[in-house]
Image (tube, rainbow, N blue to C red):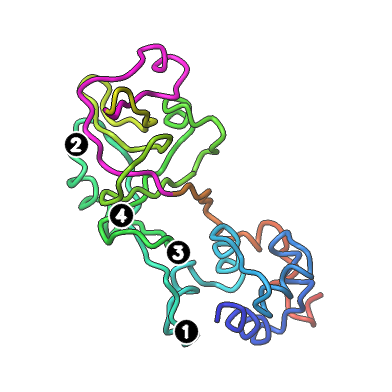
Amino acid sequence: MLGQRLRQLRKEKSFTLQQVADALGVTRACVSKWETGRSQPDLVSIDAIGAVFGFTASELLATQSFGAELKFRDYPVITLENGIPLNDLIQKYRGFRRYPSGNQTSPEAFFVALDDFMATNFGLNDFKSNTLLLIDPSAQPTIGDLVLTLTVNLGYQVLAVRETAGESEYFSLGEKLSQLGALQGVEVLGLVIEAVHNENLRGYVLRHVPELLLSNSQR
């Protein structure tokens, strides 16, 4: 289990619970609960844990690392580029960057990386820069869902789904585009499953708690 793996790594590094907690910005009790399986870290915390111990999130979650079958899968992370077909973007980024998710989606799922401009344009103002949206092309959207679409005049858009007279309609949550009402010429590319805030944590310990990197004789 992940908790057992975390405890094993902490013991190997001779870190105390408090040292790991300080490095992750959580409480000692929180780390203890992770190790004992009373709670599970989210994906952002898993990223941070990996950075502390020198692993990527994927490596930390790999089944062979701790002998338990976890239902996590890596998906490609793409950046939307208008004018380039989606399949070409997936092929372009497939081997470049990947990110894990515990959601049981189809193998064709992928993440879309958002920046501040895209989040504002899509009307996703609650999402921070570096947020990843997990998109499942095989999932069936329903009323109130968000979907990744390709529009005739606006390129790639994340739109909301509603139903009028038994027909699905798609509209933007963006401040300006929402004034257009239901958009025409919309091709649905996939259902938005989850949002994950992803931040590069390489060197996190060096930046925030460098004393953890010193041996006892150097302190």
Residue topped by disc 2: 84
Nearer to me, 215 or 92: 92
Mark 3: few, some, or many residues within 10 Å (few <14, many ≥20)?
few
Who comes first in sequence, dot 2 or dot 4? Answer: 2
Residue position marked by numbered label 4 in the rendering: 109
Q: Identify the residue at horizontal 64%, vertical 87% (top origin).
A: 12
Residue 180 belongs to the span the image colors magenta: yes
Q: What residue is shown with label 3?
A: 102
Badge 1 element? loop
Closer mark to the observer between disc 2 and disc 3: 3
Identify the secondary structure beneath mark 2: loop
Whether tag 3 and tag 1 are in contact, CB under 8 A, the answer is: no
Q: Amino acid at mark 4?
A: Ala
Q: Earlier in the sequence, mark 4 or mark 1?
A: 1
The boundaries of the magenta stretch are 167-193
At 51% from the left and 51% from the top, the residue drawn is 198
Question: Label 4's element?
Answer: loop
Instruction: Find out whether the residues at labels 4 and 1 contact each other: C-beta distance under 8 Å.
Output: no
Q: What's the amino acid at mark 3? A: Gly
Picture layout, residue 132 above or below residue 11: above
Q: CA distance from mark 4 to mark 1?
A: 24 Å
User: Which quadrant would the C terminus be assigned to in this image?
Assistant: bottom right
Query: Is residue 170 part of the magenta span, yes or no?
Result: yes
Determine contact: label 2, label 1, CB under 8 Å: no
Whole-Å distance between the Cαs marked 3 and 4? Answer: 12 Å
Local crowd size for mark 1, using a 10 Å CA cut-off: few (<14), some (14–19), many (≥20): few
Query: How far apart are the two marked residues, 2 and 1, measured between alpha carbons?
Result: 40 Å
